[in-house]
Image (spheres, grey):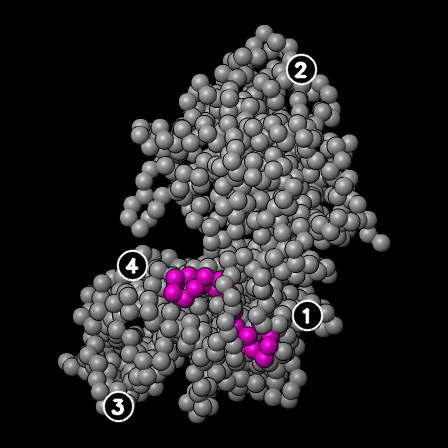
Amino acid sequence: MPDDTLFSEVLDPRNRADPYPIYKKLREVPVSRQRDGAYVVSTHAAIRALLFDPRLSSEDLPPSRRPRTGNPLRDWILNPIKNRIATSHRPLIFRDPPDHDTLREFVMKEFTIHRVNGLHGRVGSLVDDLIERCRGRDEVCLVEDLSYPLPVAVICDLLGVPEKDEPQFQKWATQLATALEPDARHDEASRHATVAAFDEISSYMRKLIRRKRRHPADDMLSGLAKPGREGNPSMGDIDLISTAILLLVAGHETTVNLITNGMLTLLRHPDELKKLKADPERAPRLIEELLRYEPPVHFRTRKALGDIKIEGTTIPKGAPVILLFAAGGRDPARFSNPNRFFPDREDNQHFGFGGGLHYCVGAPLARIEAEVALVALCRRLVEPELMADPPPYRSGASLRGPESLGIRISGINR
Amino acid sequence: MSAVDDPSIVIVGASLAGLRGAEALRDSGYTGPLTIVGDEPYRPYDRPPLSKHVLAGDLRAEATELPQLTAVRAQWRLGQAAVALDRAGRTIRLADDTVLPYRSLLVTTGARARPFPGAGAGLPGVHTIRGRDDAAALRSALAEKPRRVLIVGGGLIGCEAASCCRDLGLSVTLVDPNPTPLARVLGMLVGNSVAVRMKDAGVSFRPHTHVKAFESRNGKVARARLEDGGEIEADLVIVALGAERDARWLAKAGLLADGGGLTCDAACRAMTGEGAPDPHIYAAGDIARWPNPLFGDRLRTVEHWGNAVEQARHAARNMLAGRDDQKAYAHLPAFWSSQFDVNIKAIGSTEGADKIAIVHGSRTSGRFLAVYGRAGRTVAAVSFDEARWLPAYESQIACGAPFPPILDATDQAPIDHFSPGFPAPRLASESADTTERESIHA
């Protein structure tokens, strides 16, 4: 009899530091029904098949996960923007075709490889500054000192948020990311804080968009806000706000995790750290392996629109389907020695950025940020050493990463 | 003596299948002598670009040579067709009378363009597209800016050629006996979408049209004479009537072979007239007609790129395996075609389909995914710029799911069923080759 409570063990914060043994047990039944009626998909083949199945919907999250005050009427009166975002203008990560496609196309037109590559220099100088600030100390708190501030600064730069507003953005991003965590049973106070952050950022974005319309600059928000040509409508205001918030939230904590998990993994594999220091060209392959080995997003939830027969199981219509990407990345049927961190791995088809329709829009940017940060950290931190292994983790099981990562150092190279 | 120690393996057909088969033999550890025979003077080359990039002038015909993914260390006998087979003596004879002994033979001779059956087929200005030389000659003729191009046959090759010619700014007429292009491959319902795109691109499509002969002026083709007495002016003609096989040398040796292919058993071994497989002769690619378990073991050839690769590897595996370790070959056909700014991808076999449903997108938008059913089962799916869900339909086709296979999908309007509109099968006397609808490609 397969254990139908394994996924609750995944959610248990006590297993945050090493969920992989539970993933191994889950893979014994590729698509396994949990006691609460959700279906957990944990093998590479099954995840892959379902990513390309049109019967899986990203819409219609269970109502409990929608931000709300508890009173729909008050919600509507107090904040029409938020309400409209939560109903008819949800961000594209929670939309199905054809609406998803229209929204994504707008974003992709602005999120060009040209624009992303143009951020390379900016990422480099941000990283250098952040490391420089640690000079004179004998320990670095990686999350606080670098992983956390870097992505928000980069997203603000990409969107065209003035530098002075960045600290405010940091706060909103932190609070809103908790709402993306499907497993967290938020306490009332936290939910109110999320709603408040949502309100604040919505009205901030609305004003910023108006400003961008009047004074367009060479940034993404100006590009998205510019009026469309005939027969080619531009994005409406509410969609724009919703998209900007999505880019902030989705691009923030995930990148924090990628950088922090990356440094943690390198400190646990000192040979790889040495090799990367000697040869920064190894960075791209190393980051792909990292995305497989310690992905920033462990799972995403979808919903079955119809009965889906897969791997001997029928997922019934309406059931939540949890695509456990991080378990697929450790599937021995797909990867030899899956629990070994091995940057020279060939054919590394990971789910680090998801896959299919909702494949991460920001993947090229995340790669650049992780590459620049990890190479600089390896080069500049002198004799780095982990202060605690495992480090303390944040509570989230999906957007999983250390809460802090103390690194003892004996200096900082130029 | 086990097959692995055989002193010589001969591959007849310096083709995609021949090369991939040779590589698979080496990859599996075969170190013995290997000879590859080809009737053309060229090393194996890739055909899909011939009717696309080569005609467009974006790629030289010589640049289609296939790379060796593994060093095959073969002795090449190029420019010499195999003309005779002695199964008892285990030798083949080449056109120059060389006799090659074999312990194991892999036949990968593929197919050739079916020639125009009427008068005037050999006139200057009448072209076919199958080989490298054909494509190179046609490309230089197109570069001369012919005034009127006539394409005979609205299959995949004919349509791709029409698309290329329009891109080159040439005046193009395409004739086909059916009411729409691609009618035999995809049915008339989907074929009509191609007809619309053709019209928008400025191709003059003439349905229900049979060409009887080509006529000349000053020793060069000048017009096509139609069965109904009409005529179409043309100073360049492309005949795209599908493929046929030269299998006479195999049939003479007592194998079950004709213009439709060389019959094999499930393990890719050639069948003899006595109804038993010849354990020393294997076939793969366009020439091989075998009982595909995914088609209820009906004997079929699959003339697509992907099958040439997979079947050759499978045959190579069986060639090196013991007699009691011969594995059956199953294959889900798939092809792609790019024409008129649309990317067509197809999976499965539309043969005998009696139902069709548009399951994603719409024909009016030009982007859609159509699924074909046969006797209540899902047998094929075809995408016009809407391939993202194709993998899900592929697994439904492979397991013979009920038609239509996926309901309740995202972005799916209520599904209506139609008749796919396949033309009536041609009579045996019209064509010995029943697989023209599966004409080469991808």
Q: Main secondary structure of the magenta part?
A: strand
| Quarter-of-image position of residue B31 | bottom right
At 44% from the left edge and 45% from the top edge, which residue is drawn? A103
Q: Position of residue A347 (x, y in %)?
A: 59, 47
Discs 4/3, front: 3
Q: Position of residue A151 (x, y in %)?
A: 52, 27
* Relative vertical location of residue A226 with respect to residue B88 in this rendering, above or below: above
Residue type highlighted by circle 2 = Arg
* Relative vertical location of residue B314 with respect to residue A294 in this rendering, above or below: below
First along the sequence among labels 4 and 3 = 4
At 46% from the left edge and 59% from the top edge, which residue is drawn? B386
In contact (CB < 8 Å): disc 4 and disc 3: no
In contact (CB < 8 Å): disc 4 and disc 2: no
Q: CA distance from mark 3 to mark 1?
A: 52 Å
Q: Quadrant of the N terminus of chain A?
A: bottom right
Return the mark for residue B57. Answer: 4
| Secondary-structure class at tag 3 | loop
Q: Which residues are magenta?
A: B359-378
Residue type highlighted by circle 1 = Lys
At 51% from the left edge and 43% from the top edge, which residue is drawn? A90
At 61% from the left edge and 9% from the top edge, which residue is drawn? A137
Q: Chain of mark 2?
A: A
| Secondary-structure class at tag 2 | strand
